[in-house]
Image (cartoon, rainbow, N blue to C red):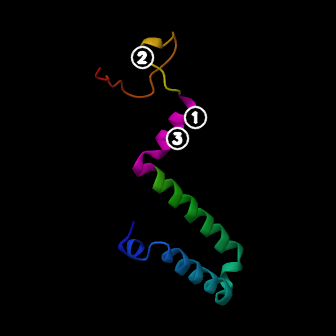
Amino acid sequence: MSSIQKRLKNKAQYIMLAIAITRFVIDKSIYSLSFLTNFLILIFGMAVYQKFPNGESIQTWQEIFAKEINADKLKLGMILSETIQKKEK
């Protein structure tokens, strides 16, 4: 979170929304197909970038394709999806 967002908290969202609405009214070039294409590529790229550094995308795939199970309950053919961590009793 940036220092501006920390200071403004929820007010930053309203300011960004006001700037976006003002751009929609003033700038007519955003109504073109090329702008929409570039904008969607940028949004998709940002979403991918935000997921990978935090490891959230890997965690998401593990939630979809894996389930939590004790190591002693593994059946033939099951593969561990992450490292084993011993719990202290």
Residue 39 appears in which quarter of the rendering? bottom right
Most foreground residue, 51 or 12: 12
Q: Tell me the kind of residue under disc 1.
A: Ile
Q: Which residue sits at x=44%, y=18%?
A: 70
Residue to which mark 2 is pinned = 71
Q: Report the mark closest to the observer, 2 or 1.
A: 2
| Magenta residues (range) | 52-66
Q: Report the mark closest to the observer, 2 or 3.
A: 2
The kind of secondary structure element at disc 2 is helix
Residue to which mark 1 is pinned = 64
> Label 2, label 3: how many angstroms apart (C-alpha)?
21 Å
Q: Which residue sits at x=64%, y=82%?
A: 21
What is the residue that sits farthest to the bottom in this orientation? 26
Q: Tell me the kind of residue under disc 2.
A: Ala
Residue 75 numbered tag: none
The N terminus - image quarter: bottom left
Residue to which mark 3 is pinned = 60
Most foreground residue, 39 or 58: 58
25 sits to left or right of 65: right
> Label 2, label 1: how many angstroms apart (C-alpha)?
19 Å
